[in-house]
Image (cartoon, coloured by chain):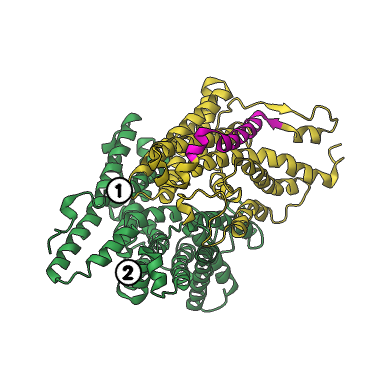
């Protein structure tokens, strides 16, 4: 029975893996999208992701409820975003370099407080069995989808709608495109960016909780392997559009699921090279989408990465 | 930072030599004072962190001093750990002169070490000196091209160098794992997959009378050489113009692309050489011991040194000491090994936030009446 699908198992595993592996990408990338739309970049989301993972795991273990853990992870992420937002507000502080520092600080704090949580098993997030109609255990397993994925999809749509047709979305876009214009119109530039960075941190924290509470579903020091960082590149690929962030997250999730899927059908040659696939893909899409000396469509004009 | 460099070059061109000296002294004092303030603030924040956890900050810093510098044994350990930091800090400091934040040292070190080990194994039958030279060349070429790729992507494709260098770190580590666990694996290395050992005779020895390997001396010499290159040659001057004002550099007809490429290649060569030295002087083979965060700590060292290759030397030794005392702190205070990471993170954030202090204190500003 388990071999009933044969090689067809590979595309199925990649498709379900795209959702399973792509969900953290989705949260971090829509968070980063919001932050970047306000004209600031937060490279520290990798640290936020790891910190969110350990917070979610720890709180879930202590409280017995994974959803409390998810919320706590978001709050810690928001606090971390606030720190980044507040420091970036100071004149002459480089937001890209500061992001790297926040990434290292976040990982340090996560490893520091995470030591006691490596062994115990916390309550996990439940998944929705969307494969109930099928007899094949592989299809059933592939269609176990976590509720957070649907929350992420809804948030991406909400964010897209907010940017396109709400007043708040417009203010964020003005601040991101021209701080001078926003000031002239009387909108608070620093406050908007501060809030956008905090909200972006909240979303990245949720993505971290997904990592430790659903997939891979445990806490260890290698829980995140640069997802937070790739998400930053992914936002550029998605041209700062939350809906395209969703597609890009699924694409990257699929690339990440390729190695394990091939390994499952016995192709173990070059496992570590497949492991590098998402990073190579990131670099390739950047090479293909970015061009020197030209503003990308949809790029916020104030973004320091666009210089 | 680029603004400060531009100000400096404009001001040092002032006609009177007395005013010139005063400007230099005041600016120089500022570049020492601000990082010291940041270090102090970071130490205070970290003390607060320890006190909240019910640990004594006094004990902590006493243990760091003891574990890093108190005895001849601990001092040698510190210097041993400082050696790779010299190179990885240079990997960040040199491109920073052009205004680029490159953090690819971790990956360049890993690949440099891997290439050096592969080269050493392939030429094992040659005389020891030849093997060492081939290994060093392999490390330099691979590391240099790796970071040069970052520079090329930046200049010709407009890809942010920070993001690409970080991504390349992950690719480099995946490549190293592939070779160490696949084509180059020594079947005898079961617990910790490694390449074959390089020939015994090709190992880099210790400085006579110490346990510290020659890599430390090579690193310090490289710091001095690169300081001369960056501050006393036309090449260094051209890179400072690019870093200060890209548009002005282009109008002057400076070849910005090649300058970026060369600076990045030098930076990567330094990190690749660090990998070769770690293999040839410490591990004897390439394995996961190359990926222990020397690259990221080096970035921190470079920022603390304000990207001055000479200032890299004392700061690398300071951080070598902090890393070296990690074990002692773990044993005596019952703190996890990540404590050092937290301390480094706080220092890093403080040092970047302190950029906002430049130009704020009147005492460091030159008197305006000439």
Residue ID at (45%, 58%): B102
Q: Nearer the viewer, mark 2 or mark 1?
A: 1
Q: Is residue B215 depicted above or below A296 in this figure?
A: below
User: Could you tell me how far apart the alpha carbons at marks 2 and 1 are, in whole angstroms?
Assistant: 26 Å
Total numbered labels: 2
The quarter of the image holding the C terminus of chain B is bottom left
Tell me which label, 2 or 1, sits earlier in the chain.
Answer: 2
Q: Chain of mark 1?
A: B
Residue ID at (32%, 58%): B3
Q: Position of residue A32 (x, y in %)?
A: 52, 42
Q: Is residue B5 depicted above or below A185 in this figure?
A: below
- Check disc 2: other Cα within 10 Å, few if <14, some if 14-19, many if 20+: many
Q: Which chain is yellow in the picture?
A: A
Looking at the rendering, the stretch of residues picked out in magenta corresponds to A145-172
Q: Between B134 and B186, which is closer to the camera in this rendering?
A: B134
Disc 1: which residue: B356
The local secondary structure at tag 2 comes to helix
Disc 2: which residue: B227
Q: Position of residue B214 (x, y in %)?
A: 38, 67
* Residue B257 visible: yes
Q: Which chain is green in the picture?
A: B
Q: Is residue B116 depicted above or below B355 in this figure?
A: below
Residue B169 placement, left or right of B84:
right
Q: Main secondary structure of the magenta part?
A: helix
Q: Mark 2 and 1 residues: CB-CB less than 8 Å, in contact?
A: no
Q: Between A243 and A41, which is closer to the camera in this rendering?
A: A243
- Check disc 1: other Cα within 10 Å, few if <14, some if 14-19, many if 20+: some
The quarter of the image holding the N terminus of chain B is bottom left
Q: Chain of mark 2?
A: B
Q: Position of residue A3 (x, y in %)?
A: 85, 41
Any magenta on residue A164? yes
Circle on res. B112: none
């Amino acid at each position: 029975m388990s071999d009933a699908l044969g090689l067809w198992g590979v595309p199925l595993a990649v498709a379900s893996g795209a959702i399973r592996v792509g969900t953290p990408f989705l949260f971090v990338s829509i968070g980063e999208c919001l932050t970047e739309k306000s004209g600031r970049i937060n490279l520290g989301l990798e640290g936020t992701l790891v910190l969110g993972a350990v917070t979610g795991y720890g709180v879930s273990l202590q409280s017995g409820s994974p959803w409390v853990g998810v919320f706590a992870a978001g709050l810690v992420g928001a606090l971390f975003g606030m720190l980044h937002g507040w420091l970036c507000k100071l004149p002459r502080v480089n937001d890209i370099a500061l992001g790297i520092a926040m990434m290292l600080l976040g990982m340090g704090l996560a490893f520091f407080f995470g030591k006691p949580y490596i062994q115990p098993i916390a309550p996990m997030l439940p998944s929705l069995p969307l494969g109930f109609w099928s007899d094949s255990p592989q299809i059933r397993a592939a269609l176990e989808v976590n509720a957070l994925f649907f929350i992420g999809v809804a948030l991406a749509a909400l964010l897209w709608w907010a940017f396109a047709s709400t007043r708040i979305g417009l203010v964020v876009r003005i601040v991101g495109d021209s701080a001078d214009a926003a000031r002239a119109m009387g909108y608070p530039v620093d406050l908007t960016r501060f809030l956008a960075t905090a909200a972006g941190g909240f979303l990245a924290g949720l993505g971290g909780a997904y990592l430790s509470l659903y997939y891979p579903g445990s806490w260890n020091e290698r829980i995140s392997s640069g997802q937070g960082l790739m998400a930053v590149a992914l936002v550029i690929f998605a041209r700062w559009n939350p809906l395209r962030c969703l597609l890009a997250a699924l694409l990257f999730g699929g690339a990440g699921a390729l190695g394990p899927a091939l390994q499952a059908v016995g192709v173990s040659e070059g496992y570590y090279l497949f492991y590098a696939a998402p990073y190579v893909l990131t670099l390739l899409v950047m090479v293909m989408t970015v061009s020197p000396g030209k503003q990308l469509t949809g790029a916020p004009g104030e973004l320091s990465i666009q210089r | 930072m680029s603004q400060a460099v531009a100000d400096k070059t404009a001001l040092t061109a002032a006609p009177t030599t007395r005013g010139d000296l005063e400007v230099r002294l005041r600016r120089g004092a500022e570049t020492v004072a601000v990082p010291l303030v940041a270090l102090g603030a970071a130490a205070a924040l970290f003390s607060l962190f320890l006190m909240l956890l019910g640990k004594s900050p006094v004990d902590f810093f006493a243990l760091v001093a003891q574990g890093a510098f108190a005895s001849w044994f601990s001092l040698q350990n510190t210097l041993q750990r400082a050696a790779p930091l010299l190179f990885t800090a240079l990997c960040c400091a040199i491109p920073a002169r052009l205004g680029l934040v490159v953090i690819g040292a971790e990956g360049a070190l890993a690949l440099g070490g891997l290439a050096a080990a592969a080269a050493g194994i392939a030429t094992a039958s040659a005389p020891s000196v030849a093997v060492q030279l081939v290994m060093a060349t392999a490390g330099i070429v691979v590391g240099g091209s790796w970071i040069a790729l970052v520079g090329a992507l930046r200049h010709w494709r407009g890809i942010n160098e920070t993001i690409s260098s970080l991504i390349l770190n992950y690719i480099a580590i995946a490549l190293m794992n592939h070779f160490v666990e696949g084509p180059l694996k020594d079947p005898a290395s079961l617990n910790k997959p490694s390449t074959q050992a390089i020939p015994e005779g090709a190992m880099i020895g210790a400085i006579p009378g110490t346990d510290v390997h020659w890599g430390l001396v090579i690193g310090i010499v490289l710091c001095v050489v690169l300081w001369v290159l960056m501050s006393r040659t036309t090449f260094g001057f051209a890179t400072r113009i690019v870093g200060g004002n890209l548009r002005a550099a282009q109008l002057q007809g400076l070849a910005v692309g090649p300058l970026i490429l060369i600076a990045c290649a030098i930076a990567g060569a330094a990190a690749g050489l660090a990998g070769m030295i770690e293999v040839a002087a410490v591990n004897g083979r390439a394995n996961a011991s190359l990926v222990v965060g020397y690259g990221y700590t080096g970035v921190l060292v470079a920022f603390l040194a304000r990207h001055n290759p000479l200032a890299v030397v004392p700061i690398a030794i300071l951080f070598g000491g902090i890393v070296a005392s990690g074990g002692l702190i773990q044993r005596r205070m019952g703190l996890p090994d990540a404590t050092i990471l937290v301390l480094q993170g706080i220092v890093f954030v403080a040092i970047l936030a302190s950029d906002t202090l430049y130009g704020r204190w009147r005492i460091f500003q030159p008197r305006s009446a000439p």
